Image (tube, rainbow, N blue to C red):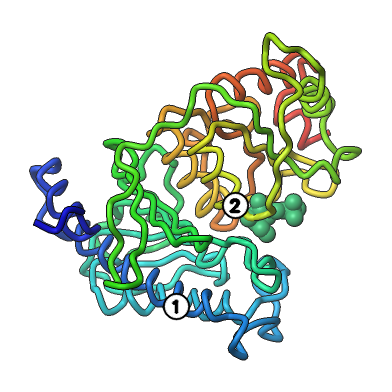
Amino acid sequence: MLGFQTLGQFIIEKQADFPYAKGELSRLLRDIGIAAKIVNREVNKAGLMDILGHAGNINVQGESQQKLDVFADEQFISALRSGGECCIVASEENEDFIPINDEAKYVVAIDPLDGSSNIDVNVAVGTIFSIYRRVSAHGACLSDVLQKGTEQVAAGYIIYGSSTMLVYTTGKGVNGFTLDPSIGEFCLSHPDLQIPKTGTIYSVNEGNYVHFPKGVKQYIKYCQVEDVSTNRPYTSRYIGSMVADLHRNLIKGGIFVYPVTSAAPNGKLRLVYECNPMAFIIEQAGGRATNGWDRILALPVTELHQRSPIFIGSEAMVKRAEAFMAEAGTLTFNDIITA
Ligand code: P6P
């Protein structure tokens, strides 16, 4: 008996939860785990290699592509291609979806290296992935990707931090695995993760304060008021890597907010491969995720790189922030973005 359970053993054991599963999803998760180990190896020695800095081109987001962004994108696509369980991949690093194997039944949406601008300063970064069943019978296409978050069959992230962890859900709770480099295996270290129902950490880029909607400004001020009975003032923590900020809040409790701003009228974060997978995970861990008004997972998905505001984390904290959004006026999300 090993005394611990590897990701591979866990996936096979949990496959029994899905009576109709023939192992494709298990193999797909295994493929993602393999690519994560390869990316981890490069991220961990980034400071030593000529793999830092700009790749010299601009991605579909209009952002300067880091060499590691491109490397991570290539590794995950390569692992999915060789694994054969994925029909198409949608990635933050590519304008259009990438056809993989039209015989396969799963679709993968991925942010290969989120927060990569932090790599140069040795701050934790992450990979975010979302898995759907295809809706097309053959000829996989964009409609296979543009599905609501409620249709996800699995979602997860890898955080390349003080240790490297893979956290995922298949809709039956959330489990965390820590990479043991000495054996090259992700080992179950955080079974059945649950986010605290409330917390004292708020995570928002307050440098955008002047551009925030009134309700967000009021919520931030609420966090800063001294009130012993509600453990305020809260602590402000903002890493600038969504995966790192959300992983901390998953473990300790807290709220992460990236609202609409005048500079980002639809929010900054991407619905398909950032907000939806993280919302699935946090809901499965007992938390809440909305755009300030509506459940993230129920939002219509119309574009591959569609943006959304996001309020995500401990249920009580997200509800409190939503109350300030509502109190700020009868403006709905559509009112604001069309104003
Ligand atoms: P800002 C990283 O670029 C990212 O996509 C998320 O990981 C992070 O939460 C957010 O953007 C940070 O954005 O505008 O605060 O620098």
Residue at point 38%, 56% (across, down) = 166
Q: Specify the quadrant that holds the N terminus.
A: bottom left
- State yes or no: Cβ of the residue under disc 1 lies below 8 Å from any atom of ligand 1: no
What amino acid is found at the position of numbered circle 1 in the picture?
Answer: Arg
* Quadrant in the picture for residue 137: bottom left
Residue 270 is labelled as 2
Q: Is residue 70 left or right of residue 59?
A: left
x and y, in percent, of residue 331 in the image: 77, 21
When the figure is inspected, residue 118 is found, relative to residue 16, above or below; the finding is below
Q: Is residue 131 above or below residue 68?
A: above
Write the residue at 72% across / 75% down: 64
| Mark-to-mark CA distance, 1 and 2 | 26 Å
The picture quadrant where one finds residue 170 is top left
Q: Is mark 2 within 8 Å of ligand 1?
A: yes
Of 60 and 43, which appears nearest the observer? 43
Secondary structure type for disc 1: helix
Mark sitting on residue 22 = none
**SS for tag 2?**
loop
In terms of depth relative to the viewer, which is nearer, 144 or 121? Answer: 121
| Quadrant in which the C terminus appears | top right
Observer-nearest residue: 42 or 297?
42
Residue receiving disc 1: 41
Residue, far top: 229
200 shown above or below 324: below
Residue drawn at x 59%, y 89% as measured from the top left: 49
- First in residue order: circle 1 vs circle 2: 1
